[in-house]
Amino acid sequence: QYIFLGGEFVRKEDAVVSVYDHGFLYGDGVFEGIRVYDGNVFRLDAHLKRLYESAHSIMLAIPYTAEEMTQIIVETVRKNELSSAYIRVVVSRGMGNLGLDPASCSMPRVIVIAEPLSLFPKELYERGLKVGSVATRRNRPDVLSPQIKSLNYLNNILVKLEANQAGVDEALMLNDQGYVTEGSADNILIIKNGVIFTPPVYLGALEGITRNAIIELAKQNGYEVKEQPFTRHDVYIADEVFLTGTAVEVIAVIDVDRRKIGDGKPGPVTNHLLEEFRKLVTVDGVQ
Ligand code: PLP
């Protein structure tokens, strides 16, 4: 396996970074997770836009243009002879001294990793996930925007730990007012009486690229989609609930805080959208 690191491809065992890298010391940097389906890099432009916007927001200058980054990503997939893959792009502040001031870091470090798919087990897609709401709240957008996909994911990690402790597959994160925002690394959509609801991102959710693709697909397929705040109660009484994300794609939720959702099985709208999503990903991408 070859990894793009510091301007060249190195073997996995040689892909190491300095302990003085501020990405390591402080979580100072940004990242993206991207999927390749049968040689198509899904929505690469949207992922790069988010990467560059996240970097801009934290005053991190990515040392490549978006075109160069596209080439690097495509080359990383090719070099590893993968046709379907999960790609991780990381841009850290780079090496500096022990102080947290980024001024000591002279050169951001760009890393691109491409790995074969490690999907959730098929059974989980067929059974659906059990999810629990957790005490850790999504950070307030006015304090730190959830749109910055930074290397500092402690909030999401705490949420995942709580989910593990509770013995559920995934966590539901609320904002400081108790409105539902998203999962640990995925967006939530619920269906009630045929209408699809998802929280507006201003409540404190990342504007997921999979979420946006599903909203488009849903509308094209005649579903009404509303971005509107909702509470846990609305989730408990929904007909269907599902999560979306680059890693999970579209996955049904069948239990939330021990309340059975619908008839406790992945529902027809979720299955329909998953099917449409699977069709979309093989045609919509950079070859
Ligand atoms: N929410 C968070 C916090 C995430 O980290 C991710 C993953 O990228 C998502 C949602 C889903 O976004 P996307 O569909 O762009 O992968």
Image: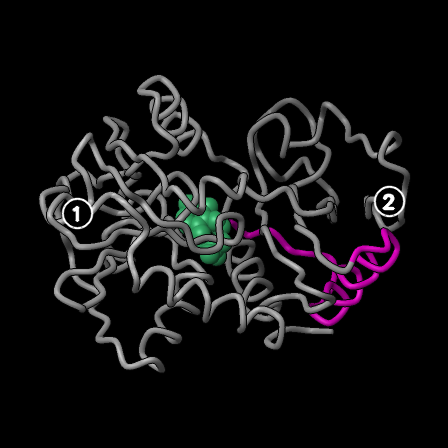
| Residue drawn at point x = 71 percent, y = 65 percent | 38
Using the image as rendered, state which of residue 71 and residue 218 is in the foreground.
Answer: 218
Question: Residue 85: x and y, percent?
Answer: 70, 53
In the picture as drawn, the residue positioned furthest to the top comes out as 165
| Residue drawn at point x = 38 percent, y = 75 percent | 216
Mark 1 and 2 residues: CB-CB less than 8 Å, in contact? no
Q: Which amino acid type is shown beneath numbered disc 2?
A: Tyr
In the image: residue 55, left or right of residue 142? right
Neighbor class of circle 2 (other Cα within 10 Å; few <14, some 14-19, many 20+) is many
Residue 55 visible to an observer of this rendering: yes
Question: Residue 76: x and y, percent?
Answer: 81, 55
Disc 1 designates what residue? 235
**As displayed, is residue 271 above or below residue 102?**
below
Question: Residue 275: x and y, percent?
Answer: 46, 66
In the image: residue 34, left or right of residue 70? left
Q: Which amino acid type is shown beneath numbered disc 1?
A: Val
Magenta residue span: 57-82
Mark 1 residue element: helix
